Amino acid sequence: MIPALMPTYDRYNLTIVKGKGCSVFDSEGKQYLDFGAGIAVNSLGHCHPRLVSALKKQASNLWHCSNLYNIPKQNELAKRLVKNTFADTVFFNNSGAEAIETGIKIIRKYQHDNGNPSKFRIITFKGSFHGRTLATIAASRQKKHIDGFGPIVSGFDQVILNDIKKVESAIKPTTAGVLIEPIQGEGGILCAQNGYLQELRRLCDKYDLLLMLDEVQTGNGRTGKLYAYEWAKLKPDIVATAKGLGGGFPIGACLANEKAGKTLTSGSHGTTFGGNPMAMAVANAVLDVILEKGFLNSVRDRSSLLMKHLTEIAKCHPTVIDEVRGRGLMIGLHCAFDNGNKLLVDRFLKKGLMAVPAGDNVVRLLPPLIVTPTEINEATSIINDTVGEVA
Ligand SMILES: *Cc1c(COP(=O)(O)O)cnc(C)c1O
């Protein structure tokens, strides 16, 4: 008999009933250090007092209001994102995939409005992940995500990462833009090199293509900058973000510069729930904390400490972990033996540490940005013990 809940996830036999800071508790009362953060969503940990208070306050005033009317907190959040990024304008969604879809539509509309309606193709990258809608699975082109869901949305050309010549030779008269994750998350914490991203910017300028970054996972402080493109010192045309922006409340956002963003006008795009007052209240509170002076500095300090411990562990046990990679608090441990990532994640969990498997045989560590040195030491001691046993 078919289960009432569609079995689209291979779930761990574990029920989390409460969270506080960087810890969660299961139905038996067992405590776990949460170094997965709901896949980079709980950016400020669980039940951060300032987020709880923002949500409660909003919940007793207004839950939903149609985008037919003014929603002051949308203007406030948009203005703050504009002030602190490359962007001139913002559209709010409910999820990462929706924010990516918005950006894909902007790329097509930009070329259309500029007299190039035949330009609609977007260059994407092997190993990428952009979501589960029809267009985003076509963009990522992962076999297990597209099999059986054809006909596949057309207009995406895929190349391998970090080889700029492959991009230039993939540009056709019909190419409209480039869509890339600054660090591939699901793909296994694979960084696009800074120089490579700068070359992409140069190519986009040369061929009048829009450069769109998928910062759904890398954004909102995760890499130690508000957005990861800042590390490459460039200005993208479009950034889609989500996950950490709501700290656990569903939200997505598509940020754009003026030339890209002005293509979406009244009636050309819309959403019922996107930008709803509850999401806006929480995301503004998330930004209150992340933009506080010194916060991102402390993320970078915590990152150095965690990286230092992990690098030592890898050096002692190269038969288990042969590479530590990533940036900020988006870290990948590459396993030296087949399916090592799943085995390690299982063993960590038994010892009270949550981590997330990723592609390319990688274990992802994505702790809340408020993780303390004590919690980092606890986590790395579990990792050290486990890796030692496995070796
Ligand atoms: C999670 C993720 C998405 C999809 O976000 P959803 O909210 O699940 O739709 C897209 N891109 C990247 C890089 C992601 O990590």
Image (cartoon, rainbow, N blue to C red):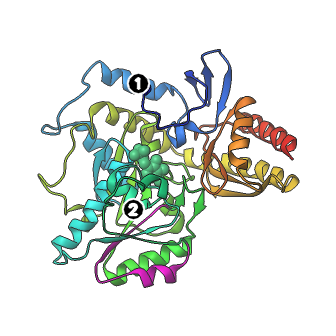
> Which residue type carries mark 2?
Ala
Name the side, left or right, on which 372 lies relative to 1.
right
Tag 1: amino acid: Ala
Real-space CA distance between mark 1 and mark 2, rounded to the nearest whole angstrom: 31 Å
What label does residue 239 carry, if any? Answer: none
Image coords of residue 378 (percent x, y): 76, 34
Magenta part of the chain = 162-181
Quadrant housing the N terminus: top left
Element at label 1: loop
Callout count: 2
**Residue 121, percent from left and from top:** 31, 72
| Along the viewing direction, whichever of 165 and 203 lies nearer the viewer | 165
Asked if the magenta segment contains residue 187, the reply would be no
Secondary structure of the residue carrying tag 2 is helix
Q: Nearer the viewer, mark 1 or mark 2?
A: 1
The residue drawn where x is 56% and y is 48% is 296
**134 horizontally vs 247: left or right:** left
Q: Badge 1 is on which residue?
A: 4
Relative side of 304 to 199, left or right: right
Task: Please say whether residue 335 is visible from this viewpoint.
Answer: yes
Q: Is residue 131 above or below residue 347?
A: below
The residue identified by callout 2 is 139
Say if mark 1 contacts mark 2, CB within 8 Å: no
The part of the image, by quadrant, that contains residue 209 is: bottom left
Residue located at (45% from left, 34% from top): 248
